[in-house]
Each structure stands twice: as structure tokens, then as C-alpha cells.
């Protein structure tokens, strides 16, 4: 069994605590938007290369949140993206930078993953922890081929 398959088994075994359950997150953030329950399991979708996922710097987070106030995703210029992440974007031909919503529970014990299926995108942050914590916002700059029609934002915590 490969690592992804093992991770899927762990997820399905009930060891994972979803943000939607009060045990993991003390309250749902308005940015939280899981895919519909009838959707295919998002972690089986193609995953965006991690080199194309960039966290907005802490000092620029308020600016990013203002831009994301009414939309889950916003197209950026290359210069706007550089200003938000504090460094040059890596070369990714055929892509454009997009500012996207993200949520996390425990920053230091997790990472962001982005899954894309056709015109749908899921931003997920999985972390480790043993007690309920509040969801926290983290805007991301993603280098994508096209803007998705639907964006979902989730997080989870494994014990």
C-alpha cells in the first residue's frame, strides 16, 4: 500500500477529527466550506504541486483578508502575489497567481494541500493535536492554470 493509500485508510478509520466537529475546532469560521457529502472523496483528486502553494506573510494577511471578504478566490497580478508572499513566485509556465482562502487548526503540526477536480478546488490543512482549538485564517497564493468555478476550504486534526 502506498503512503496516500495508508493516509486514506487512517482517515477512514475515524482517527481524523474534522473541523466541522466541535472536538477539533471550537467554532466554525465563515471561510469553512466543505465539499458536498455526495462529492467524490477530495483527497483522491489530483493534488496541486506543493511548489505552487504559497502562504501570505503575516504582515500582509489583513490585506489578503480584505481582498477575500466577498470571494473565496481572487486573480492577482504577479506583482501583487510577490507583495503578498514576500518573495518571487517560482516559474510555473501556463499558470496565473490566485489569492485563496485557507484555514488551519495547528499551524506547526500540519500543512496545506490543494486538490483539483475539473473546475472544483479544495484547500485543506491537516494537522496534529489533542484538544479543540479555534480555526485560524491563512490566505494562500496558488499558481493555477485557470480559476475554479467552486472553491471549498476545510481543515482537520488527527490525534
Image: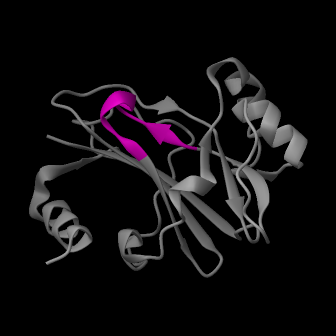
Q: Residue furthest top?
A: 59
Q: Nearer the viewer, residue 136 or 107?
A: 107
Q: Where in the figure is residue 3, as x and y percent of width and height? A: 21, 67
Q: Where in the figure is residue 96, as x and y percent of width and height? A: 80, 60
Q: Where in the figure is residue 111, as x and y percent of width and height? A: 40, 44
Is 70 part of what is drawn in magenta? Answer: no
Q: Nearer the viewer, residue 30 or 43?
A: 43
Relative to 108, does residue 142 appear above or below in the rendering? below
Q: Quadrant of residue 109?
A: top left
Magenta stretch in the rendered image: 102-111
The colour scheme used to paint the residues is: one colour
Which residue is rendered at x = 74% and y = 58% of the image?
91
Q: Residue furthest front?
A: 91
Relative to 112, does residue 138 appear above or below in the rendering? above
Which residue is rendered at x = 73% and y = 34% of the image?
87
Q: Quadrant of residue 28?
A: top left
Is 108 part of what is drawn in magenta? Answer: yes
Q: Nearer the viewer, residue 86 or 158?
A: 86
For the C terminus, the image quarter is: top left
Q: Where in the figure is residue 9, as x and y percent of width and height? A: 14, 69
Amino acid at each position: 500500500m502506498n503512503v496516500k493509500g495508508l493516509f486514506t485508510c487512517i482517515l477512514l478509520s475515524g482517527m481524523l477529527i474534522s473541523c466541522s466537529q466541535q472536538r477539533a475546532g471550537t467554532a466554525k469560521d465563515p471561510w469553512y466550506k466543505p465539499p458536498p457529502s455526495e462529492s467524490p472523496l477530495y483527497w483522491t483528486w489530483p493534488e496541486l504541486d506543493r511548489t505552487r502553494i504559497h502562504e501570505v506573510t503575516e504582515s500582509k494577511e489583513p490585506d489578503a483578508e480584505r481582498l477575500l471578504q466577498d470571494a473565496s478566490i481572487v486573480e492577482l497580478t504577479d506583482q501583487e502575489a510577490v507583495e503578498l508572499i514576500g518573495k518571487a513566485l517560482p516559474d510555473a509556465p501556463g499558470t496565473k497567481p490566485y489569492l485563496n482562502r485557507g484555514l488551519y487548526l495547528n499551524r506547526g503540526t500540519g500543512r496545506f494541500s490543494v486538490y483539483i477536480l475539473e473546475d472544483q478546488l479544495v484547500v485543506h490543512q491537516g494537522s496534529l493535536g489533542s484538544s479543540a482549538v479555534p480555526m485560524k485564517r491563512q490566505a494562500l497564493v496558488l499558481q493555477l492554470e485557470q480559476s475554479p468555478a467552486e472553491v471549498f476550504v476545510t481543515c482537520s486534526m488527527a490525534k
